[in-house]
Amino acid sequence: MKWTIAMTQEELNRKSIIEKAEDKRIRQREGAEKLGISERHFRRLLKQYRERGDEGLVSGHRGKPSNHRMKADTRDKIVRFIADPIYTGFGPTLLNEVLERYTGISISKESMRQIMIEEDKHHPKKKRKTKTHPPRERRCRRGELVQIDGSYHAWLEERGPNACLLLFVDDATSAIEAARFVDTETYFAYGGLCKSYFKAFGTPVAFYSDKFSVFRVNSRTGIHKQAITQFTRVLNTLGIELICANSPQAKGRVERANGTFQDRLVKELRLQRINNYQDANAFLPVFLAAYNRKFAVLPRSVKDAHAPLDMSIDLDFLFSIHDTRTISKDLLIRYHNITYQIVTNRPPENLIGRQVLTLEDEHGGLSVFLNQQQLNLTISQVHPTKNPRVVSTKSFASHAVSPPADHPWRTYGKKINGKPLRVSDS
């Protein structure tokens, strides 16, 4: 009777040395040294070879299930758990953590990945070639640099509208210092989060952001060359530096946090049955604590770079929209197409032509100050406007405007010497 014995390269090498020892061409001690085993184990292998031939050198575990394999009933429990529709879209790593949290079953994330592939719950993606970006070394101290950004996403999936999540990520630790759901990424949205952040931790050394119009004036022509935004004005007052990144990779910590939140936070909000952003904001501190425990690292220096907040500073005053107006001869000022009458007992000649500071709060309320004294106002006249509402370039409400049918752009013909030639309508 003939049969085939499959042997690995290691087993073939072992067979040649065993045969030399059997033929007395080498000593057993030399054979044990060449195989890297003890003389006792070498004699055991030699005895098995004499009794069973080549089959005695083949591993006895081959073709048998592993002693460390998962029990069938445990695997059945995992399969039933991941079959729940609420876990649709969960990745292997996150689903493995949720499995341990709710059932106490602890397996490796690779085992979870293989089970999900077998159950058609996960489809591996081919790794794409990506452009490498040299990593930037972390800052040494907490509060030395805070990366800020907003992420628009369907955070509640089909249970609610899209919204923007503002994140403040510390560069030294990767910890999320502050977060909040807002409707759109605006100056007042960042201002509200900054106020709570400053009250909790103090003022950081620097903020690291993108070039969104909240952070810098992107027009560099004419009078706008030296202009600053309201947000920059506040930071200059507080002594905080603002750095605008030239690429998303430059502020990679907050960008990676956005990606992680778009995966994990969406699933957590689903598990918590949260259907509105008021409840989502209430849940954020719980999620941030768990996130920081898992992903935050220790800074290289134990010193904190945050400066204590001066309690004499009125943050509501500071984060209002500051502008100036000149009082007319009738003691009127105009702001956002509304004419306001200044009510005062002072002689009019003391106010005419004076420049006043206007403050607009996040609710649209207007306050006017002259030499740090607030003036009383009444609405004199409201002027209707036909100007379209300004929409943030990052807002979901923004849309492309198509030129009208009679726009000159549509009547240009071919170019001559690089210049467009106007084509008459006749």
Image (cartoon, grey):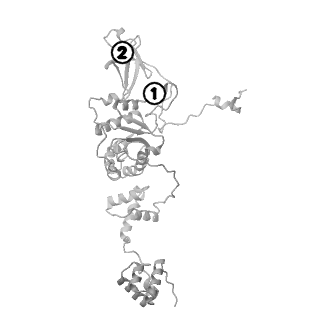
Label 1, residues with CA under 10 Å away: few <14, some 14-19, many ≥20 = some
Q: Position of residue 15 (x, y in %)?
A: 46, 83
* Residue most extreme to the left: 311
Q: Position of residue 7 (x, y in %)?
A: 48, 80
Q: Earlier in the sequence, mark 2 or mark 1?
A: 1
Q: Amino acid at mark 1?
A: Ala
Say which element carries label 1: loop
Q: Quadrant of the C terminus?
A: top right
Front position among marks 2 and 1: 1
Mark linked to residue 342: 2
Q: Nearer the viewer, residue 160 or 128?
A: 128
Label 2, residues with CA under 10 Å away: few <14, some 14-19, many ≥20 = many
Say which element carries label 2: strand
Residue 232 in sight: yes
Q: Quadrant of residue 352?
A: top left
Q: Position of residue 16 (x, y in %)?
A: 47, 84
The residue that disc 1 covers is: 227
Q: Residue at x 48, y 81 (%)?
A: 12
**Drawn side of residue 419 relative to residue 38, left or right:** right
Q: Nearer the viewer, residue 229 or 164?
A: 229
CA gap, disc 2 to disc 1? 29 Å
Q: Amino acid at mark 2?
A: Ile
